[in-house]
Image (cartoon, rainbow, N blue to C red):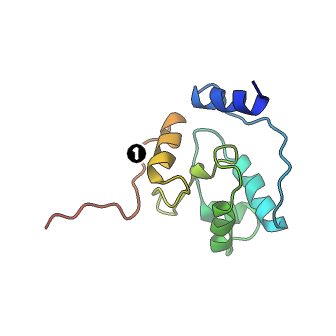
Amino acid sequence: MTPFRQAFQSYFAGDLTIWDIALDMEGTPFQLAVWQALAAIPYGSVTTYGALAQSLGQPRAVRAVAAAVGKNPLPVVLPCHRVVGADQTLTGYRGGLMLKEQLLALEGVRGLSKRGHERFNF
């Protein structure tokens, strides 16, 4: 079994909390900085796009950070599922909000609401 596959199995079994895999990725310097910041978000924690921008020393670059997060080439390994909206709601995820919610639940994060998914009774 490859180390990468073994790491994924360990993650989904709840045994892997830190990805220790060497990555050689291509992107703009800004994207690489954002992806490195994603890798630093601790297992079982969430942060906001604004906090990521702040951590990069560019507090006004929230939309640029969101765009770079959206181009993440390795979801789960670079845990973009740990990034939530400023109001602590689940926001866009390439795999869908249900998967984002499930990944966070696997890590022990529960109770975040989904933006734009309120129910209306007519």
Q: Nearer the viewer, residue 83 or 24?
A: 24
Q: Residue 12's quadrant in the figure?
A: top right
Residue 91 screen position, x and y as percent: 49, 60
Residue shown at 67%/75% (left/top)? 60
- Residue 117 is left or right of residue 89, and the answer is left
Residue 82 screen position, x and y as percent: 58, 49
**Mark 1 secondary-structure assignment:** loop
Quarter occupied by the N terminus: top right
Residue 40 screen position, x and y as percent: 73, 47
Quarter occupied by the C terminus: bottom left
Total labels drawn = 1
Q: Nearer the viewer, residue 56 or 20?
A: 20
Q: Is residue 51 above or below residue 4?
A: below
Name the residue furthest bottom.
60
- Residue 110 is left or right of residue 52, and the answer is left
Residue shown at 46%/62% (left/top)? 87
Q: To which residue does mark 1 refer?
A: 111
Residue 28 screen position, x and y as percent: 82, 67
Q: Residue 25's quadrant in the figure?
A: bottom right
Q: Nearer the viewer, residue 12 or 16?
A: 12
- Amino acid under disc 1: Gly
- Residue 52 is left or right of residue 96, and the answer is right
Q: Residue 14's quadrant in the figure?
A: top right
Q: Is residue 39 above or below residue 27?
A: above
Residue shown at 52%/42% (left/top)? 104
Name the residue furthest front.
1
Q: Residues within 10 Å of mark 1 (few under 14, many from 20)?
A: few
Q: Is residue 16 above or below residue 26?
A: above
Residue shown at 34%/60% (left/top)? 117
